[in-house]
Amino acid sequence: MRRAVRGAAAGLAVAACFVLAGSLTDDGGGAPQEPGARAGTVRAAAGATVVEAGARQAAPVLAGDDLDGRPAGLAELRGHVVVLNVWGSWCGPCRAEADDLERLSGQTRADGVRFLGINTRDRDRAAARAFVRAHGLSFPSLHDPAGDLLLRFPPALLNPQAIPSTLVIDRHGRVAAAIGGPVTDEQLRPLIASVLAEEGS
């Protein structure tokens, strides 16, 4: 039963990502590509939009208070590979992926990976904090009840209507991969490994 649920979640993620990829142009070979980018710089892989190093855009400035009122943001994580996850306590698929994210956060921390959440559309921090406790999330999340932080990203990489969404950000603070929809361990782990393996990234 659990395998079937995971399979359904993975299918939703792939479907959501094809919607995301549809906002990109195609180089004729079936690989989605950013307008104006050279061939092969953007491709679909494992249900994700993956951007090659030469075509990556810098992630916008993200800073604010976490769910406990402490300052948090991307700037302090520069030099690490960062997994940025957008979630809400009201979101069923967010609950489905939370345990995988927490497990990956613990397993990859020694490799230099850091996780950061953006909690969106939760006006009440108490509901968001209850979600964090329920899933034992150890990484901080910026509180973004109105979705203002999401609007700083290009919609082709982060659709503010696609909750949850996950980005992998390289050591230089550039967006290397994006998944619109729920993500699984099987999808996210190879993306993290690929960005970690980049020389000088």
Image: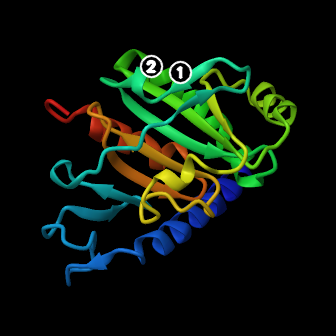
**In which quadrant is the C terminus drawn?**
top left
**In which quadrant is the N terminus drawn?**
bottom right
Residue 86 coordinates in the image, percent (x, y): 60, 46
Question: Mark 1 and 2 residues: CB-CB less than 8 Å, in contact?
Answer: yes
Q: Amino acid at mark 2?
A: Arg
In this view, 127 is above or below 147: above
Res. 75 image quadrant: top left
Q: Which residue is mark 1?
A: 106
Q: Mark 2 Cα within 10 Å, few/some/many (few <14, many 20+)?
A: few
In this view, 34 is above or below 69: below
Q: Which residue is mark 2?
A: 109
Q: Nearer the viewer, residue 146 or 103?
A: 146
- Horizontal relation, residue 27 to residue 181: left or right: left
Residue 170 coordinates in the image, percent (x, y): 31, 37
Q: Residue at x 25, y 51 (%)?
A: 56
- Horizontal relation, residue 102 to residue 193: left or right: right
Seen as rendered, the residue at the extreme bottom is 28
